[in-house]
Amino acid sequence: MATFAERLKALRAERGLTQEELAAAIVMSRSTIAGYEAPSKQREPDFGLVCRLAAFFEVSVDYLLGHTDNPHPPAGDRDAQMTARRLIAIRESRALSRQNLAYQLGIDVADLIRYEVGSDAVPDELMDRLAGVFDVDGRYFTGELSKEAMERALGKTYFEAPASLSPEARQSVRDFIAFMIDRDKRGR
């Protein structure tokens, strides 16, 4: 199977993007992209970057990492995927690391990662513990709360580009949010 470096370079080339264009699109430097594409450097990306790249190229994380040759595996459980997105959102809005949350829940980090990528459904008893850790209504994770209740759970700034960013950076955040909303709608 292909390596991350090979997949990244191939996906970029398939889309007709230069390293500079890809770097600008995902807000990082060209030299960082070059470092990830160079197999001799063996530079490893962090999980957040892998997820951003997978979303940008509309492929699975497993495909990007070279774990499968199928870029678009069959859609998994939509409820598990919704719960995964909401779990990541609230964990990040509270600036909580995966390790810290796994410790608080009494589970392995590997299990938490599987819940966050939507490959495993969160068991009901764990859902209750999550609601307790984050002090939110358990319906937050199932998507049954109103936008206002979601804003209270995550904090209003999660839904807006922070004012401290430059106008260009704020527009980039708005564009990314619009891209993700559109992508999510197409996936339904």
Image (cartoon, rainbow, N blue to C red):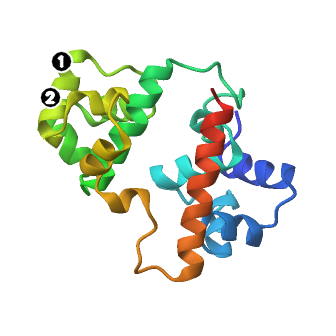
Give the percent coordinates (x, y) of residue 7.
72, 45
Q: CA distance from mark 2 to mark 1?
A: 7 Å
Which residue sits at x=35%, y=37%?
A: 146
Q: Nearer the viewer, residue 112 or 44?
A: 112
Left or right position of 157 against 43:
left
Relative to 174, residue 142 above or below: above
Give the percent coordinates (x, y) of residue 119.
46, 24
Which residue sits at x=54%, y=19%?
A: 76
Give the percent coordinates (x, y) of residue 171.
59, 71
Say the numbered circle drawn on residue 129. Answer: 2
Q: Is residue 54 visible?
A: no
Left or right position of 161 against 68:
left
Question: Quick one: SS at disc 2?
Answer: helix
Q: Is residue 159 visible?
A: yes
Disc 1 residue type? Glu
Say the numbered circle drawn on residue 125. Answer: 1
Which residue sits at x=32%, y=44%?
A: 150
Q: Nearer the viewer, residue 77 or 167?
A: 167
- Number of residues whose C-alpha sits closer than 10 Å to that of mark 2, classed few (under 14), some (14–19) or many (20 or more): some
